[in-house]
Image (tube, grey):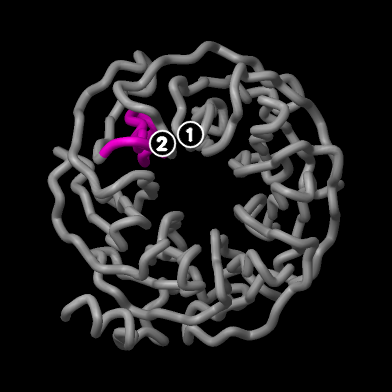
Amino acid sequence: MNRREFVVGAVTLPFALRLAPEALAGGTPVALVTADTQSRVAVVELSTGKVLRSIHTLPGPRSIETASGSFGVVCHTVQGAVSIIDGPKLAVRHVLRGFDEPRYTAAAPNGRHAFITDSGRHEVVTIDVVQGHKVACLAVGGPARHVSIDSSGRMLWVSLGSKAEHVAVVDVSKPAAPRLLGSFTPPFLAHDVGIAPGGRHVWVSSGDSKSLAVYDRRSSAVLRRLAAGAPPQHVTFLGPHAYVTSGEDGTLRVHSLKDGRVLRTTDVPDGSYNVQEAFGWITTPSLDRGTFCVLDRQGRLARRVQVSPSSHDACFVMTA
C-alpha cells in the first residue's frame, strides 16, 4: 500500500471478535482520546472503533494516562490543571489546580497514586487519584516531561526536557515521600523513556537524532544503541516487542526486545507521536491528523478512526 492510499483510506481487519477475553469481562473496554483543540476527550469503543460520546473538559487536554485501572488522568498544560476522569461513569470527577505546566503521568500500581511531571516547576508531583488532591512534590532539577514507572512501582525514570541533557531517577516506593536518587546523561538529547517488561531494561528515545538507547535499569549503563526514525520518537511494549513511533516520519517500528532488530515498519498518519499498549493492541493518536490508529501485535494496522482535528494522547478504561 502506498502512502497516498493509506492517508485516504483506513485498513480494517476483522476486529470485533479479536479482543482478549479478559478485556471483555466486567465492562466495555474504551479508549479515552484527547481532542486537544476542542476541550473534550472522545470515548472510542475498542471493539468497533465507534466514537461513543465526548467528555467535556477544561481547554487544552494534552496527555492522558490510566490510573488505578478506572481513572483517566488528563494534563492541561496551558491551564496549569489536571482533570481526573471517572472511567466507569465517563465523567470528570476531580479538577486539580496549582500546577505550572503539567505534562505526563505514570500510575502507581497501588491503585491510588499517580506521579505527574510539571515542566514549569521542575517537579514530579504525587497525587491521590481517588480523593483528588496533591500528596507530595519533588524537585528533580529540570523541566520534567516524559516519565515511566517500573512494574514494582518503586522507580521512576524522568526525561528532563523535550530535548533533555539529563534523565532523572526517582524512588517512589513511598509515594508520599518520593526521593531523587540522581540523574545521568544520555548519549543524545533524550525525549521519551520506557521501562521494558521485567524491569531490567529502559528504552530512551531521542529528541534530536535518529537514535535509541537501551539501558540497564540498575547500573544506568548503555547496553545497545539502535537506529530510529526522525525525532522525537516514543515507545511502548507488548510481549517480546517494543513499538517505536516517529510522528515526523509517520511510521511505527516493531523491535525485538531480545536484540533490538526491526521486525516490521508500518505507515501511520503523520503526527502519530505517542504510542500505547491496551488489551493486547497497540494504539497511536495523531496530533496532526486527529486520527486514532489500532495495530495488532505484529504491527499491522487494524483500524483508523477519525476523532478530532488534533489528538495528542490516549488511555484506556472499562466502562460500567
Magenta stretch, residue numbers: 194-209
Residue situated in front as seen by the camera: 290 or 49: 290
Q: Which residue is mark 2?
A: 195
Position of the N terminus, as image quadrant, is bottom left
Q: CA distance from mark 2 to mark 1?
A: 6 Å
Position of 161 relative to 171 (above/below): below
Residue 158, visible in the rendered structure = no
Q: Quadrant of residue 284?
A: bottom left
- On whether residue 76 falls in the magenta region, the answer is no
Q: Residue at x 23, y 44 (%)?
A: 228
Q: Secondary structure at mark 1?
A: loop
- Could you tell me if the residues under marks 2 and 1 are in contact, i.e. CB atoms within 8 Å? yes
Tag on residue 55? Answer: none
Tag on residue 150? Answer: 1
Q: Residue at x 57, y 21 (%)?
A: 170
Q: Residue at x 20, y 30 (%)?
A: 225
Tell me where residue 138 appears, x and y as whole percent.
Answer: 71, 21
Tell me where residue 40 appears, x and y as whole percent.
Answer: 71, 70
Q: Residue at x 52, y 38 (%)?
A: 146
Q: Quadrant of residue 194?
A: top left
Position of the C terminus, as image quadrant, is bottom right
Tell me where residue 111 appears, x and y as whole percent.
Answer: 68, 46
